[in-house]
Image: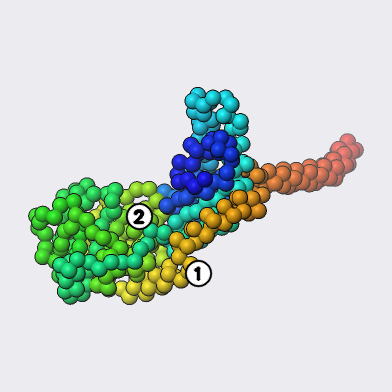
Amino acid sequence: MVHEGWAHHSYMGLLDIIGNPPLVLVSTAHSFSFLTLPFNNPENPSYVPVNFTGNTDKMTFWQRLTNTLIYLKYYWLFLKTMNEEDQVRQAHLEKKYIKRSIREIFEDGSRTSFLSCFDSRITNYVRPVQPKIVEVGPLHLIEPKPLDQKLQAWMNEAPAGVIYFSLGSNMKGTSMGDFRRRAFLKAFARLPQYRVLWKWESEDVMEGQPENVLLKKWMPQQDVLAHPKVKLFIMQGGLQSLQEAYHYGVKLLCIPMFGDQDLNCGRVGKIKTGIVLEFNDLNEEYIYRALKTVLEDPVYSQNMAYYSALSKDTPMSPKEKSVWWIEYVLRHKGVAHLHSGAADLSIVQYYLLDVIAFLAVVLISGVALVYLALRKIVQSMIRPNEGELRKKKVK
């Protein structure tokens, strides 16, 4: 059974009904914590940033504290969701179809289940991953096609290159407000040597639109990024767009909006393949300085070239890797041999909290015993002296 990973809780109850086949979960995003929890994948919140936090793998004390609390929240929500799914099953399914609880199915299914993520070490931080969790990479990449002649000519004639501006399919350009829109237009006007290709909801000329800006309702993004004249990609930090930028070696200006975009953009800023802009701080000077820095500082070009080469250096394509692993699960009727004992441990056992508590009790008890013993010895030495002093006073 191949199922999208985000809503897999809802379908776990069907496994018993259809013969308990191996389950392959597919995530078009990162290997989020709530996806890897059934596998008890080791995610130490001291250096593994929880998704949606915007943290990197280098955190301050307060960031580590927040990261840990959010991770525990995910763990609680995971258990809560399983209990709620059980209630739904009991309310809508006949009793003969309810053989085990969702939690029991999870515990058994974790031995045969498999998780395939469209993630990679380029766009995410290095962390331990169990062999049952495979990062296949950007499965959506395709061979770029030629652009239409008019757009191709317009891009070819750009003196210094092209800046491509798209905030993805979920974020509309009109939602940024007039102030920020004008700030971008003024910043672009200060870079006349570059042409700006802007994905906008209307192709009508904007008020104050400079001559070097072209508006398009829709663009074949991969074909645009593959054009050698494209020097910079202004984007919102979506994973697929990020993977395309790395594949084609285009530097980045990231404006995270929601979801995992803070995490994605944080990675961009850390490895200096681009700069991260805060949406609420956008103004003409802020945007212009960021554009100038990324376009002119050779560090960003060198880093992007390095990571672009890494993203292409794989033994097989993401499609081939994904197909191979699904067929592998079919051939062996699951991946029970890849099951880790970590999946059978509670969170207390997994993080050795019981061992730490035991050692703490032993240590505290030992210190207390030593203290009491020393106190007894000191008291036994002082009391005879006190007796002798009393005798001297009596005399």
Asked if residue 109 is positioned above or below residue 140 in the image, the reply reads above
Tag nearer the camera, 1 or 2 = 1
Residue closest to the eye, 149 or 288: 149
Asked if residue 117 is positioned above or below residue 272 in the image, the reply reads above
The image position of residue 297, as x and y in percent, is: 31, 73
* Amino acid residing under circle 1: Pro
Q: Residue at x 43, y 67 (%)?
A: 311
- Give the labeled residue for mark 1: 315
- Give the labeled residue for mark 2: 238
- Marks 1 and 2 sit apart, C-alpha to C-alpha, by 25 Å
Residue closest to the eye, 162 or 207: 162
**Mark 1 or mark 2, earlier in chain:** 2
The secondary structure type at the circle numbered 1 is loop
* Amino acid residing under circle 2: Gly
Q: Residue at x 29, y 48 (%)?
A: 170
Rate crowding at label 2 as few (under 14), some (14 to 19) or many (20 or more) other CA atoms within 10 Å.
many
Q: Quadrant of residue 149?
A: bottom left
Q: Residue at x 54, y 25 (%)?
A: 94
In this view of the protein, can residue 277 be seen by the observer? no
The secondary structure type at the circle numbered 2 is loop
In this view of the protein, can residue 338 be seen by the observer? yes
Residue closest to the eye, 38 or 218: 218
The image position of residue 331, as x and y in percent, is: 59, 55
Relative placement, left or right, of 381 versus 283 is right
**Are the two marked residues, 1 and 2, in contact with CB atoms closer than 8 angstroms?**
no
